[in-house]
Image (cartoon, grey):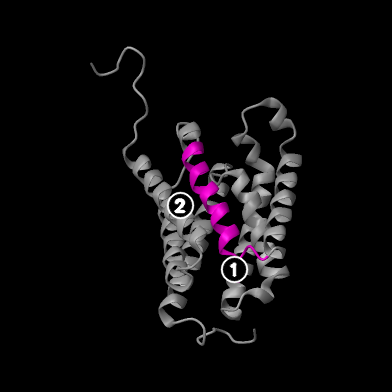
Amino acid sequence: MNQLINTTDYSPLVLILAALGAIGWIIAYFITIHNIRKHQYVEMPVFCACGNIAWEFLWGFIFYDRINMGLLYIWSYRVWFLIDIFIFISVMRYGYKQLDLPLLRRNAKVIFVGLTLACAAIITAFIKSELDNPMGSQTSYILNFLISATYIFNWLRFRKTQTYSNSVAWTKMLGTLMYSIFFFIRFPEVYAVTALSSAVFVLDVIYIWMIYNYKGEPEPGHANA
C-alpha cells in the first residue's frame, strides 16, 4: 500500500470519519499525558494501557501491510504508539496506585509487562486466524469495550482521591464514535464490531453522565425515606 490515502476502496466520508476518530484519540492521549505530569497518576486503566500499546505496536509496525486505507492511516497507528510510550512508562511508575492488594502492588511492574505480552499474543492470534479485518477493528473494539467499562469502575473507586478529566471522557467518546460510524458504513457485515461499538457508546455516555451527575450513594442514616 503505497498510496497516501486509498480513495478507491474508501469514500471521502468514511476517510474523514476515520481521520476524526484518530484525532479524537490523539487529543485524549495528550490530555492524559498532561494530567500524568501534573498529578503523577495515570487515569487510563492500566489493563487498557497495556492492551493499547500492544495493539498499536502490532498494527503499526508488524501487520501494517494488512491496512489498506493508505500510508496516512498506517502512520496514525504509529503516532498513537509513539505517544503511548510515555503513558506506558508512566504506568510502570504510577500504575500501582490502581491496585489495592499489597501483593499486586509489590509485583505491579511484572504484572504490567505480563499483561502487555499476553495482550500481544492474543491480538496476534486473532490476526493470524483471520478473525480481524484490515483495520484491526475486532480486537480494537474488544479492548475498547474493556476500556470503557474499566474507566467507569476506576472512576467510582478513585474519583475522591485522584483526578479524572472531563476532556478525556469527551474526546475518547467522540473519537470512538467517529470510528464506530465509519465501521458501520464501510463494514456493515462485521456484526461483532456493530455490537461492540454500540455497547462502547452506551458505556461512554454512562461515564460522562456519571462524571457530571453522580454524587455517590447516601451515607448510612441519610437515605431518603
Distance from the alpha carbon under mark 1 to that under mark 2: 19 Å
The percent position of residue 29, horizontal first and vertical second, equals 54, 57
Q: Is residue 17 left or right of residue 55?
A: left
Disc nearer the start of the sequence (1/2)? 1
Front-lying residue, 130 or 218: 130
- The amino acid sitting under disc 2 is Val
The kind of secondary structure element at disc 1 is loop
Q: Quadrant of residue 216?
A: top left
Q: Please state which of the two labelled residues, at mark 1 or mark 2, is closer to the viewer.
A: 1
The kind of secondary structure element at disc 2 is helix
The percent position of residue 169, horizontal first and vertical second, equals 43, 50
> Is the residue marked by circle 1 packed among few (<14), some (14-19), or many (20+) residues within 10 Å?
some
Pointer 1 residue? 133
Chain part drawn in magenta: 130-154
Q: Is residue 39 above or below residue 141?
A: above
Q: Is residue 201 visible to the viewer in this orientation of the structure?
A: yes
> Is the residue marked by circle 2 packed among few (<14), some (14-19), or many (20+) residues within 10 Å?
many
